Amino acid sequence: MQAQDPSAPALCVLASGSSGNASVLRTSEGQLVLIDAGISPRRTEAALAALGHTLHDIRAVVLTHLDSDHFYTAWTSAITRRLPSDAHVWVSTAHANARRLQPLAHASRLRTFDTTPFQPAANLTFSSRLAKHDDQGVATFRIQTPTGTLGYLTDLGEVTQALTDFHTNVDVLAIESNYCPTLQARSERPDFLKRRIMGGAGHLSNHQCLAAAEAIAPTAHAVFLHLSRDCNHPDLVAALHEGADYARTIAAPNEPTRWVSITPATPPAPQPHRPHAAIHTQNTLFGANA
């Protein structure tokens, strides 16, 4: 299990699922970057309070895309009213012309990114690549902190070789594991919705997530995002990653995760040498069923 370093940059998923997605990345200085704002400002404020933070600790909001479960409508006005005056919203150039963002642009709160690295807060460098999702795609992030790297990938239609190459060997990987194909097929969802989710521009299945995690090979920790409430279960996700080298956290729709330090895996402590006689004695004492 990865040791938690309270002084290191860390990720906490406040909520993740079809009802809303939001995560916070905490800097070493205690500032916050909100990655997606898919739950209400009031709910975000309550979640942050439970973590010992307030909305005034948010230095930036970085959006993967503009679906309502990733950018809650009320944030368009709340950003200018409730966040610090120097806090900006960062959005991909692929999404920047959306009408709902125009009030933020008029208030000089909007910033855009492409493939050039950008810094939404001190000592955090985001690099982004677009992936398939519906018509306009979704931004994925490789984030460099002073202590390690974080990969953040959600709402992906598929994970390409170029995408795994871009994110390979991050220390912490936060990635969508949206649905079980069997549960999806058996569900009462309309066929058009099933086709959208499973058609290569919607969401990742549990097995697609597993293949991506194996290719990216996070050194320390994997955080699984956006589980479908109707077509997935945390036990299904956990079982697929049983025995993996990385520690695992499964995000929930209504409960924040623990803080996950953005640091490399801690090597196991060397074990003291014990004579064979002592080992034989221990086996004799405790027996084969210990």
Image (cartoon, rainbow, N blue to C red):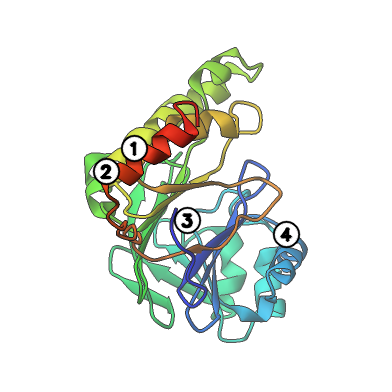
Q: Which mark is residue 216?
A: none
Q: Which residue is mark 4?
A: 40
- Residue 119 appears anywhere in the view: yes
Q: Position of residue 247 (x, y in %)?
A: 44, 49
Q: Which residue is mark 2?
A: 276
Q: CA distance from mark 1 to mark 3?
A: 56 Å
Q: Which residue is mark 1?
A: 280
**Are the residues tagged 2 and 1 within 8 Å (C-beta)?**
yes
Seen in the picture, residue 93 relative to 222 is either above or below; the reply is: below
For marks 1 and 3 on the same chain, the one whose residue lies earlier in the sequence: 3
Seen in the picture, residue 173 relative to 186 is either above or below; the reply is: below
The kind of residue on which mark 2 rests is His
Q: Residues within 10 Å of mark 4 (few under 14, many from 20)?
A: some
Q: Position of residue 266 (x, y in %)?
A: 35, 61
Q: CA distance from mark 2 to mark 4?
A: 61 Å
Q: Which residue is mark 3?
A: 64
Seen in the picture, residue 145 relative to 242 is either above or below; the reply is: below
Q: Nearer the viewer, mark 1 or mark 3?
A: 1
Residue at the (34%, 68%) spot, across then down: 148
Seen in the picture, residue 5 relative to 250 is either above or below; the reply is: below
For marks 2 and 3 on the same chain, the one whose residue lies earlier in the sequence: 3
The kind of residue on which mark 3 rests is Thr
- Residue 205 appears anywhere in the view: no
The kind of residue on which mark 1 rests is His
The kind of residue on which mark 4 rests is Ser
Secondary structure of the residue carrying tag 4 is loop
